[in-house]
Image (cartoon, coloured by chain):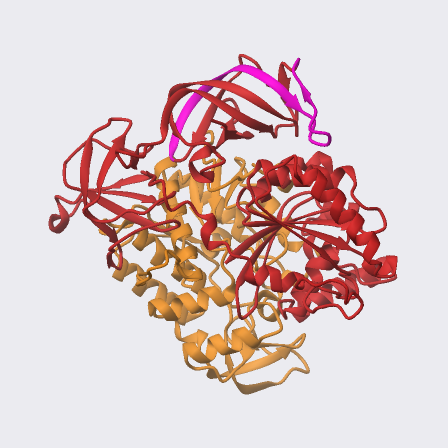
Amino acid sequence: MLRFATAGSVDDGKSTLIGRLLFDSKSLFTDQWESVEQVSAQRGDDYTDFALLTDGLRSEREQGITIDVAYRYFATPKRKFVIADTPGHIQYTRNMVTGASTADLALILVDARKGLVEQSRRHAFLCSLLRVPHLVLCVNKMDLVDYDQEVFEQIEAEFKAFATKLEIPDLSVIPISALEGDNVVNRSENMTWYEGTSLLHHLENVHIASDRNLVDTRFPVQHVIRPHSNSNRDYRGYAGQVASGVLKPGDEVIALPSGFTSTITAIDTADGPLNEAYPPMSVTVRLDDDIDISRGDMLARVGNQPRATQDVEAMVCWMDESRPMRVRGKYAIKHTTADVRAIVKDVQYRLDVNTLHRSEDADGLALNEIGRVTLRTTKPLLADDYRRNRSTGGFIIIDEADNRTVGAGMIVG
Amino acid sequence: MNETVSDYRVSHLAALEAEAIYIFREVIASCQRPVLLFSGGKDSIVMLHLAKKAFAPAAVPFPVLHVDTGHNFPEAIEYRDKRVDDTGVQLVVASVQEAIDRGMVVEPPGGSRNRIQTPVLLEAVEKHGFDALFGGARRDEEKARAKERIFSFRDEFGQWDPKNQRPELWNLYNGRMHPGEQIRVFPLSNWTELDIWHYIADQDIPLPSIYFAHDREVVERDGMFYGVNEFIRPTEGEKTEVRRVRYRTVGDASCTAAVESNADTLEAIIAEVAATRITERGATRGDDKASEAAMEDRKREGYF
C-alpha cells in the first residue's frame, strides 16, 4: 500500500490528474462519473469538471477550490493506493502538512507554461519538512508547450537547484499531460525524448519497504490489558503498535521512563503468538517481570533508547486561526501515547515558507506559519529526532481551553 | 492476522487491521464511555470483529448500540442478536418507532426514516452518557465522508462542522472534549468495499444471508430493485417479479435496494464487487440521491 499526497492548485490540473488515474485504473464508478457530468452540465461548464469528483464539500464546489484534505482509494494489480488530495493555497498550508504527515510519496504539479511558482517551492519545502521520503515533480500540460523537451528540462533544472537546499532523499521529474494522458498511465508517444517511466508505473514500483525504521526499537504502550476473568486472571499485556524496530520473544527491553529492564516472554495477538513484531503491527507484549508500566511509557532497547528530555526543540507549524502561538503560552502536547503539558520558552525564528528566509525577531506564530520553537514540558518526552523517526519525532499541540488541535511539531536534535 | 513473513512486510489487509486495532485502543485510553454502533450490516460486523481482537484476551470493554429504524430486514436482526450473544457484549437498542409513538420525532412522508434516526441517536447518547461512538463508515463510500477525520469531533448537538475539523496528523488522534460533547470514531476510514469483503473472507466471518444471492420478490423503481416487504409495496403501474438478487448494503428496509446477482459465495461476491462499476451507495440507496450534498447536510445535523 502506497500513501501519496498530491499538491498543486486547481489550475495545475491536479483534479484532472487524479481523475485520469482513477479513470484509467478503472477505479471510477459509473454513478460517480454520471453525477459529476450532470452537475457540470447544469452549471453550463464547457467540459466535465473532474474537480467535482474530489471536492466533496458544498462550499468547495461553490468556490471551485479545495479546502480540506480528501482521501481517495484506488488499486492496480500491483499495488493499493491511498491519495491524500491536499489544497494548494497558502491559506491551507496546514491541510497540506496534515496530508503530507502520513505520505510515503508526494506529487507536486506544475504547469509547463508557467514553470515553477512560489507555490511549487512551498510544497517542496513542506514535503521536506514532513520528511516525505519520495517526491515526484509532474510537469503538466506538456501538450500546451508542444511537448517541448527544452521547456521541460529548464523546469527540471530549476527545481533540482532549489531542491539542493532541502532534504529530499528521492526525486523524480516526469513530463505529463493529464488531460491527454501522456505519461500518466502509459508512456507518451509525443515525448519520445523522455526516457523515464510513466507516473503510474513509478507509483507502482517505487521502493518504500526501506523507508521504515527497523533499527530503533520503539514500542509506545497504548493500553494495559488485564482481563477480569477467572481463566486469565494473571494475564498482563502491554498493547500497542510497533512504532519502529523489531521485537522478538526473548529480547531484553528497557521500560521508560522507569528504566527497569525485563525480557519479552510473548508477543500476543488475537490469532495467537508471534515470533516477531515490526511496524505497523498492533500487538500485545508480555514481560518476564511484573513491573509498573502504563499508557505513555515506552519499551526500547538498553543500548538504543530515545532521548528523555523536558527541553524540546522543534519545527512547529501553527494551525489555529483564532489565536496565534505566543511565547510563554501553555499548551497540551500529544506525543506517541503520552499526554504532557508544555510552555513555549522561545521562538528562535520564523521561516518564510516561500523563500526559506528566517526572521529571528519573531515572538509567536500565526496561522500557517512555521518556525523553530523551544518548549519545556511537565514530564520528559521519550523522543527521537523527527528526521530519523517520524513516529517518535512528531507531536501535536492542543489548546487546553477548547481542546482544538492548534499545531504540529517535528522534533529536531 | 498472522502471516509468516521474513522481509518485514505486512499485507495490505494486515496493515488496515493493525491501524483499526490501534484506533480502538486509543479511544479506550482517552474516552470514558465509548459505544460501538452495530446494525448487523457487514461494516459493523467487521468492526465488532476488530474490537474483539483489539482487547483479547479481555472482553470488549464497551456496549454496542443499534439505532433501530423499525424498518429492518428480519435476517439482519436475527443475525444481530446472535452475534451479540456470541460476543457477550451488552446491546443497547434505541428505537425510532418508540420515539415516533412518544411524539419525539414525526414520521416523514415518503417512508424513509433515515433522517429521523439522528435525534433518536442523540437522545440515546445523552441518556447513556456515551462520549465516543464507533462507526463503520468508510471514506470511499461518499464524497463528504472522504473529507471526514478518523476522530470526528461533534459538538453537544452532534453536529459536524466540515470547515472546522481538527487537523489530524500522523497517527496522533485528539480525543479531548468537554462534557456533553462527543467524538465519532471511524476505524475503517481507509478501507474500501473490496477490502471489507476480502477481510470477511480471510477471517471467515459469518454474515446475514441477505448478502448472498437469493430469489426475492422485487419491484423496480428508478432502475433499482426493491424487495417487496411490509414497507415497500408496489404502487399503481408497478408490477412485482421474482428475481435473483443480493444486498450490497443492509440499511433501512424501506429505502435499501438489492442488486441482481448470482453471487452465492464470498468468492463470487468478491469477484462481483471487483468488477462492478457502480458504488454501493449509488446502487442501493434511494436516500442519497436527493441532493449533491445530502450526506454533508445530514452529518451537519448530527447524522453519522
Q: Residue at x 37, y 58 (%)?
A: B7
Against B145, is B238 above or below?
below
Q: Mainly helix, strand or loop, the magenta region?
A: strand
Viewer-proximal residue, A180 or A213?
A213
Instruction: State the red chain.
Output: A
Against B125, is A310 above or below?
above
The furthest residue to the bottom: B242
Viewer-proximal residue, A196 or A306?
A196
The magenta segment is A337-361
Q: Position of residue B284 (x, y in %)?
A: 58, 70
In the rendered structure, the answer to whether residue B93 lies left or right of residue B108 reads: left
Viewer-proximal residue, A374 or B251?
A374
Against B272, is A243 above or below?
above
**Residue B188 visible within the image:** no
**Chain B shade:** orange
Magenta stretch holds residue A202: no
Q: Residue at x 80, y 68 (%)?
A: A190
Magenta stretch holds residue A356: yes
Which of the 4 image quadrants contains residue A159?
A: top right
- Picture mark count: 0
Viewer-proximal residue, B54 or B219?
B54
In the rendered structure, the answer to whether residue B156 lies left or right of residue B86 reads: right
